[in-house]
Amino acid sequence: MDQTPPSSDRPAAQQTGSSRERGLDRVIALLAHLHRVGRPVRVGDLARALSAPRSTVYSLVKSLTDASLLETVGPNGEVFFGKSMYFYGMDYLRAHDLFERARAEVDRLARETGETTQFCVLHEGKYTVAHMSSGQRPFRVSSEVGVGIPLPWTASGRLLLADFPDAEIRAMIAPGDLHPPRSAAMTIEEFLAAVAAARQEGSCITSGLIDPYTHCIAAPIRDQAGRVTATLCFVVLVNTPPERIASLRDMLVASGQSLSLAPVAKRE
Amino acid sequence: MDQTPPSSDRPAAQQTGSSRERGLDRVIALLAHLHRVGRPVRVGDLARALSAPRSTVYSLVKSLTDASLLETVGPNGEVFFGKSMYFYGMDYLRAHDLFERARAEVDRLARETGETTQFCVLHEGKYTVAHMSSGQRPFRVSSEVGVGIPLPWTASGRLLLADFPDAEIRAMIAPGDLHPPRSAAMTIEEFLAAVAAARQEGSCITSGLIDPYTHCIAAPIRDQAGRVTATLCFVVLVNTPPERIASLRDMLVASGQSLSLAPVAKRE
DNA sequence: GATAGATGTCCAGTATATTGGACAAAAGGG
DNA sequence: CCCTTTTGTCCAATATACTGGACATCTATC
């Protein structure tokens, strides 16, 4: 046939057309997929999930496993993240003092209060749990580490947006984000008001937003400029007495402030 | 590291300096380089270090930062590992019960004894610290997390090789590995004997091997089949009294055994 | 402020990485 | 047992990712 002009006027309706793609892009999608799935995946399934040629995926996976970025695990040829990924993740930790200290603080708070405690950040426009420590009776928690959740669904989300002008927040929030799965939808104005309230208050408590049987108690962590860069939060059962909630909030605010100190020079 | 010497006269048909290379391979080298260096690196320096074309590296780094696998940091355009790398590393942790429990145990041992404590594994034929918690007076420790060190230089290395036949160990140890930097060289036979002794003993103590002023106390962690898969170790000052060393070793052996239990089913 | 060097972006051309398909071997399934 | 599906490996062909070089901006050094 003649040369098929690549969509002269309109983009291909289906991107499933045999598109030759960069190996690196496929790898990035592959890693994201593994993260989403959260468990080892067979190479064949990977190819299917990414709609990439099998031979390509085999080749890429070989390179990645040779580099220990992936590991083959299980009796079948399933692959998952490897040791190098772990080490590189630790490098990130080492470069980010706040993360390391916050992780330790979360573990301490969880140990001392017995409550499920989280350290949360804004990542790619979503609320994301960066570390979590389960309380004494670990109940079903709705957010896994590293999985983005719409900001309006959480108390921390209100704090994380404290420094953004309303216009930016509007742009950041997709329509569906205003309707938590197990709770009533809110308007963008209501949410903006909630952000403003959290900003004013210096903490935030929500009830039954993601999970109808829990409260969420959050406190900000600020950088040197005073901007909220992360949060700490407790997830407690709905029947927790108000005075305990207040006490937990005070602990959290105090911890948040101690983590907000200007990063000490750790080099010698 | 200039691991790609100009190679005055290479056998033909090999890369002649300007070798067009796969993007993914460059990325893998890039990540390894960042890990070696251990701090943010400017893109130009990356290109130089990898001896890769600048335009290529810019393009790759752009893809990686867009994916949050790298992050731009600092006033100049330096890049280092990004949040996604951290999350993927956490995924590795979640998939490896042993790592998570060992990390907690290391933190506990360090807190309770005040000694520098490490969790070590065999990675790519080297002894590698997978987690470390500094003691009360954190002194200069010679091994960073994730950095491979020749097996003969450490007490843990002797334990990690306990299940390998002598022939394999010989093949695994490079000649230079038998000469610790601050200590006298050993013969391969001496090392094999030390491995055998560690195997017999169920623990291992070395003195002044990497650092002349420290002892290294190590205990094995075993899998269901009883093979050594990892170790715990204390790094203590050379003047530590023998009875304390014995007591620390006993603690370590006990902790190692508790971690050696068959992995509990954590699924519900 | 002139020189020298780095940085980030852009572009056309080509070496080659990606691709589809073919294949044997293993793994079910009925 | 045969039939179907999946797996892992290999290969030739070509779409394109990588490359080299050119360029305009910045930073430093003297």
Image (tube, coloured by chain):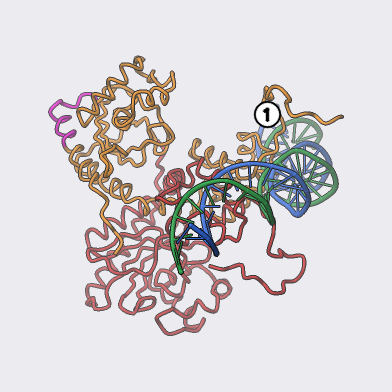
Chain colours: A orange, B red, C blue, D green
Q: Quadrant of residue A46?
A: top right
- Depth order, front residue of B258/B113: B113
Q: Mark 1 lies on which chain?
A: A
Tell me if I can see residue A124 in this picture: yes
Left or right of residue B128: residue B8 = right
The secondary structure making up most of the magenta span is helix
Q: In this view, does A106 lie above or below A1?
A: below
Residue under pointer 1: A16
Q: In which quarter of the image is residue B49?
A: bottom right
Q: In which quadrant will I find the C terminus of chain A? A: bottom left
Q: In this view, does D11 lie above or below B218?
A: above
Q: In this view, does D11 lie above or below C28?
A: below
Whether residue B187 is in magenta: the answer is no
Q: Dot 1 surroundings within 10 Å: few (below 14), some, or many (20 or more)? A: few
Q: Is mark 1 on a helix, strand or loop?
A: loop
Task: State the image coordinates of residue B90 (x, y, percent, origin top left).
Answer: 42, 46
Whether residue A243 is in magenta: the answer is yes
Left or right of residue B48: residue A224 = left
Tell me if I can see residue B33 in this picture: no
In this view, which residue lies farthest toward the right? A1
- Image point (49%, 35%), residue name: A36
- Image point (22%, 39%), residue name: A114
Task: State the image coordinates of residue B211 (x, y, percent, origin top left).
Answer: 35, 76
Left or right of residue A189: residue A42 = right
Left or right of residue B156: residue C20 = right
Provide the residue span drawn in magenta.
A237-250
Task: State the image coordinates of residue A76 (x, y, percent, origin top left).
Answer: 60, 45
- Image point (28%, 49%), residue name: A101
Q: In which quadrant will I find the N terminus of chain A? A: top right
- Give amino acid for label 1: Thr
Task: State the image coordinates of residue B39 (x, y, percent, origin top left).
Answer: 42, 57
- Depth order, front residue of A120/A181: A120
